[in-house]
Image (cartoon, rainbow, N blue to C red):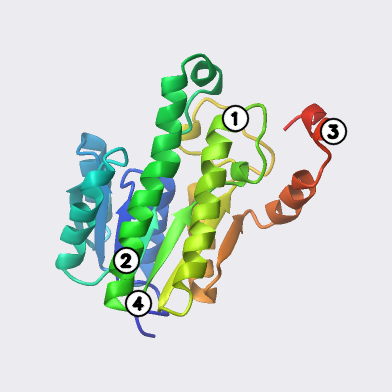
Amino acid sequence: MSAAFGPPQSLLVLGGTSGIALATARRLIARRTRTVWLAGRPSPALDEAAGSLRALGADVRTVAFDALDPASHEAVVGKVFAEGGVDMALLAFGILGDQAQDEREPLRAVQVAQTNYTGAVSAGLVAARALQNQGHGSLVVLSSAAGERARRADFIYGSSKAGLDAFAQGLGDALYGTGVHVMVVRPGFVRTAMTAGLAPAPFATTPEAVATAIELGLRRRSETVWVPGTLRVVMSVLRHAPRALFRRLPV
């Protein structure tokens, strides 16, 4: 199969220390991927992530990337594409924040929004244009089931993911027919370092399960992937629940 329709030979991860992204990279390396770029803030964690993937036999390179510095995104992505084609870009960065504290300190809430939405709009558009210029590739965007409907418990995070999700869907429509495939991934609660210490929500999943769903979605050329799949029905019900009822639900 060609790189356009088979497992990607080359992968760019925007958010190079993401547990979900690294699980996805491991799964793809086991299939076909040979070159991986991990883009993230320089840190021991980024170096460790790169080393763990090199141990699997991939050519892994790191590049400095900051979601909160949109002015640098074009140069960062351009550097990667200048080294060769990229079959898949995975937009995997984001922060959960602390709802109670973020409500008390609006600047913290703004940082959640800027990271999860504004930074993603910038990086997503830059990556999409680079893929379009080469004529093929997939842009996979990690959204969240939390973006389907704002909950009292995490409406700051949820609203940022709602914006990201709507943006990614629109970008997919804009790129339809260009050779670039956009896939939106909506996991529920994922057991990662970001959610450590939080009580798992119903339908909790793992990075490995999300990685499996991403690979299957790529193979099927899916536009939207839910993880687990049952969340599609659950969130459809919750999305249409009357607001007075939704407020009283333990979600």
Closer to the N terminus: mark 1 or mark 3? 1
Task: Determine whether the residue tagged by mark 4 lies in a helix, strand or loop.
Answer: loop
| 246 to the left or right of 47 | right
Q: In the image, is 93 to the left or to the right of 228?
A: left
Residue 93 visible to the viewer: no
* C-alpha distance separating marks 4 and 1: 36 Å
Sequence-wise, the earlier of marks 2 and 1 is 2
| Cα separation between marks 2 and 1 | 32 Å
Compared to residue 81, the image places residue 112 above or below, namely above
Residue of label 1: 154
Query: Considering depth in this image, is 119 or 23 the residue closer to the camera?
Result: 119
Label 4 environment density (alpha carbons within 10 Å; few <14, some 14–19, many ≥20): many
Label 3: which secondary element = helix
- Residue sitting at x 41%, y 78%: 178
Q: Quadrant of residue 146?
A: top right
What residue sits right under mark 4 in the picture?
136
- The amino acid sitting under disc 3 is Leu
N-terminal label among 3 and 4: 4
Q: Is residue 192 above or below residue 31?
A: above
Mark 3 surroundings within 10 Å by alpha-carbon count, few (fewer than 14), some (14 through 19), many (20 or more) = few
- Quadrant where the image shows the C terminus: top right
Q: Earlier in the sequence, mark 2 or mark 3?
A: 2
Is residue 184 left or right of 41 when viewed as pictured? Answer: right
**Mark 3 lies on residue:** 245
Give the structural element (helix, strand or loop) at label 2: helix
Give the number of the disc on residue 129: 2
Residue at x-position 52% and y-position 74%: 221
